[in-house]
Image (tube, grey):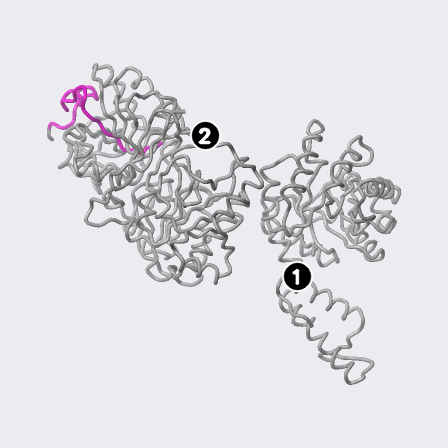
Amino acid sequence: MRRSMLFLPGNTPNIIQNGEILGADAVILDLEDAVAPTEKDSARILVRNAIKYMGFGRCEVIVRINSIDTDFWKKDLDAIIPVKPSLIMPPKTSCAQDVLAVDAYISQLEEKLGMEPGSVGLIPLIETALGVENAFQIASACKRVKAIFLGGEDLTADLRCKRTKEGHEISYARSRMVCAARAAGVEVYDTPFTDVNDDEGIYTDAQYARSLGFTGKSSISPRHVKAINEVFSPSLKDIDYAYEVMEAIRIGKEQGKGAVALRGKMIDAPIVARAQQTIQAAIELGLGREA
Amino acid sequence: MNGKVVKSLREAIELSGLKSGMSVSFHHHLRNGDYTLNMVMDEIAALGIKDLTLNASSIFDTHAPLEEHIQNHVVRKINTNYMSAGLGHRISEGLMEEPVDFRTHGGRPRDISLGITPIDVAFIAAPAADCAGNCSGKVGPSACGSLGYAFPDAMYAKKVVVITDNLMPYPLRGWSIPEIYVDYVVEVDAIGNPQGIVSGTTKITRDPVGLIMAETAVKVIQHSGLLKDGFSFQTGAGGASLAAAQFLKEIMVRDKIRGSFASGGITGYLVDMLNAGCFESLMDVQCFDLKAVESIRTNPAHQEISAMQYASPAAASAVVDKLDVVILGATEIDTNFNVNVHTDSNGYIMGGSGGHSDTAAGAKLSMIIAPLFRARLPIVTDRVSCISTPGRDIDVLVTQRGVAVNPKNQELMQRLKDGGLPVVDINELKEIAERITGKPQKKTRAGRTVANVIYRDGNVIDTIKSV
């Protein structure tokens, strides 16, 4: 389960060494924007060693590499693929070809290292207008893509508008991303809320993202993780309802009914699918029981 | 009025009969804003007096001129409870021929009252005083709140000089130290810099690791069985400790728990807890911020206590012995729960026990909050560089990666496990830290002794070697 993803600068050992205890479901170890060009090599070594020797416990590990229009991205992958992160995040992904270039290079490395093909997934970061328009092609570019990720800051620069707390300027991009991801059958994650001192605003922003259909949300501050986890966790009411749905389906099957209703409302396939997702999330959070 | 007010510091020193080889004392409520210690020592040096024993409840970086007085043999010996890194580093490098004697906030008044460390002349910086020497820290341009640590000096020194920048009409209202102890009063332009005396506000940490530890600390208190009506509490002014106080307040207010008292150095957060009905009283030996100063001045439930009442083992009874829970810090803690708050990882002096050992000994639950590592250094070690507080007095260590309970306290261990807290063996915490940071090479302790660490019972529990 990835409700929250926390960006950690790849050149800050003090922060990285506490990465696993900050409450996020995933950490994104950043080799790109957070790291100055002069520190790219040391960050690469630090991130590689942190994954290899320290580990992040139950926290999933994602590494944001440098974009494919730089000289750094292949060196990043050379260093990081051998330590088997869960996902690689290529930034500034604007089309399927960008994804395929990274996919091909990772495949080469996997073969060379004797790793299982496709064992490292991709979560392309979409942060250009072109990328948003090509979101479905990016999400469905190859099997390695497990999710897509919206980057609101760079996108607003590309859109030539101001990034605001309310986020009206990225409404279209958010909806388009969710639609593209669901059409491609992958997960979708929302851009960080960047005012680290606004403890209320993060709730509003995360609730809005969830209402649109995002799977989870990223953060640049550990202080936002709790809010994101709360918003993207199923409520106890949701969980109870999901179990009621599954119980109604079970009874309906026993009774040989073709259509099943709960509280006067028909239970169709999407409702069952959502109930199953909710129960799965509840189990992962220790709130569930087998249906 | 009477003949106590003298024209100058020099006159007061001369009248006090101070001679070479005697001892002088100072209190530290003006903290890093204090002017008086330097003023007095400069005057003493100018008078040609040498070989003094300096008994100061704490020494801060603002007291850097002491180095010159040590080099010139004006000061031969130092007794203190805390020394910040400035002079501490120089002492560690062998500045003094005689070792510094570190005591605790309770041990100092004990030894003064028992005549073990007699004081010939006490100099008491007073934010307000009258011509007879009645004095207080609660009002005036240099207000610092409580004068708790100055009480034993006033009561037991052969001569007492009050230094004030706020001479008020007799009788001073709400005096803390009464005229009966005071021999001379000196008015000066300023006794301290208000900026350095108390901070405007003490602030809760925003560091996520600190907040995680604070949340865990409060869960430990909740599951200890001690958090109920009549609860008593002490915590320091560090960011994580303050966060713990804030979280504790929320729980006490929510569950309508009416505690008895909070004690020690008082911050605005403890004042907020008092005002929210979490405690009946604050027992204040030192104020840390302006809110605490305002509170002690205006709220009768916020009470000033002397260092003896706070923590002296020689007193008939003391506040620390009535504490339920104390939250403390550590620069190092070892697998036997011994705590170091005197030296840094390189063995340099940069602190002192203050009330650490006193509260740890007295409280039913003594809790250390410390990150498992600071930068590249693990905090849990095989043996601390210096034992400030013995492990027998520590019940639990709270880190960001788990809680270690002293095996001597099996009941607490079981309570915390039952409460679902991440209880981990302290050896395991050490291994987790070393897996991340590596095992640092330990500094050897082979130099000459530059300081003795004297436990509150008067016994030397460790020595600090030169670096």
**Image coordinates for residue B25, horizontal then vertical, percent:** 23, 29
Q: Which mark is residue B443?
A: 2
Residue occupied by mark 1: A284
The part of the chain drawn in magenta is B3-31
Viewer-side residue, B142 vs B217: B217
Q: Position of residue B303 (x, y in %)?
A: 27, 48
Tag 1 subunit:
A
**Quadrant of residue A253 in the image?**
bottom right
| Amino acid residing under circle 2 | Lys
Q: Quadrant of the N terminus of chain B?
A: top left
Residue B368, placed above or below residue B260: above
Q: Is residue B21 magenta?
A: yes
Q: Nearer the viewer, mark 1 or mark 2?
A: 2
Q: CA distance from mark 1 to mark 2?
A: 46 Å
Secondary structure under badge 2?
A: loop
Residue at 55% from the left image edge and 35% from the top image edge: B376
Q: Residue at x 47, y 56 (%)?
A: B219
Q: In the rendered view, does B210 fall on the left or right side of B366?
A: right
